[in-house]
Amino acid sequence: MKLPPSLLYVRVKEDARHGFGLWLPLFLLWPLIVVILAPVFLCTIVADAGLAAARRSYHHYTRFLGAVLLATFEIRNLKVHVRSPKAHVNITII
Amino acid sequence: MSEERKRILDMLAKGKISAEDAENLLDAVGAPANKQGMADLADKVLKTGEIKYLYVKVDSEKGDKVDVRVPLSLLRSGLRLTSLIPPQAMDEVNASLREHGISFDLSNVKDSDIDELIAGLKDMEVNVKSKDGDDVRVYCG
């Protein structure tokens, strides 16, 4: 089973300073996303049903939304590391 | 060689069908197997961990360094999404690509093309070295 991204780690370090790291708990947003997406999915299902009844060739808004959601799930393990002589920035999605 | 392919080639040899018919029949016989085979290969490449990520590494002369690790499953999902983009939005995207000199129709991207692309990434490596000393490397691992 695929899970959405759970944590976002951001680390910033400037010059010789110690820098700081932030763990952002993305899993706390999951319930909010479910609450927002439930009515959106309902709307797309109604829209798709209407479009299918009207015999329009495109009636895949629900599938599209689902695919967008799955694509965001796949963002886990994305890592970006930028280093310049003055600063370091690390971003990791877990 | 499968029995169906052999029969088609026999019919062509005996002049019962034209070369064009034979080509169409061979495509029809081979297509599902090739499609499935390519999907299996892409799955194997991703699941066995042969390659999991696309790496982009930039090393500039000035000392700046950028390392990006993108999961290949994200690439796959993103490409699959193109087949579900609403037609109006797809027209806009294609028009914008054309404006920028990229003559590429995203609506023509099929699942089998995506699987073929993922499977092919295993052996891909791009190395660019500019005369300024900048170094760009793109590879999968």
Image (spheres, coloured by chain):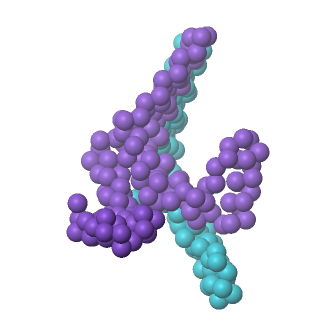
Chain colours: A cyan, B purple
Q: Nearer the viewer, residue A11 or B120?
A: B120
Check the image and name the residue furthest to the bottom: A53
- x and y percent of residue A17 in the render? 55, 16
Q: Residue at x 37, y 35 (%)?
A: B123
User: Percent position (x, y) of residue A37?
Assistant: 59, 69
Q: Which is nearer the eye, B120 or B80?
A: B120
| Number of dots carrying numbers | 0
Left/right placement of residue B40 relative to residue B109 reads left
Does residue A51 appear in the picture of this structure?
Answer: yes
Residue depicted at 73% across the width and 47% down the height: B98
- In the picture, the quarter occupied by the C terminus of chain A is top left
Depth order, front residue of B53/A80:
B53
Q: Is residue B25 something that shows in the picture?
A: no
| Quarter where residue A60 is shown | bottom right
Q: A12 left or right of B15?
A: right
The percent coordinates of residue B135 (x first, y second) are 53, 18
Frontmost residue, B76 versus A94? B76
Q: Is residue A70 above or below residue B49?
A: below
Which residue appears at 50% of the width and 59% of the height? B110
Q: Residue at x 42, y 68 (%)?
A: B18
- Quadrant assignment for the N terminus of chain A: bottom left
> Would residue A57 be found to the left or right of residue A92 on screen?
right
From the top left corner, tell me how far across and down residue B136 is, in percent: 52, 23
Outermost residue to the front: B15
Q: Is residue A37 above or below residue A51?
A: above
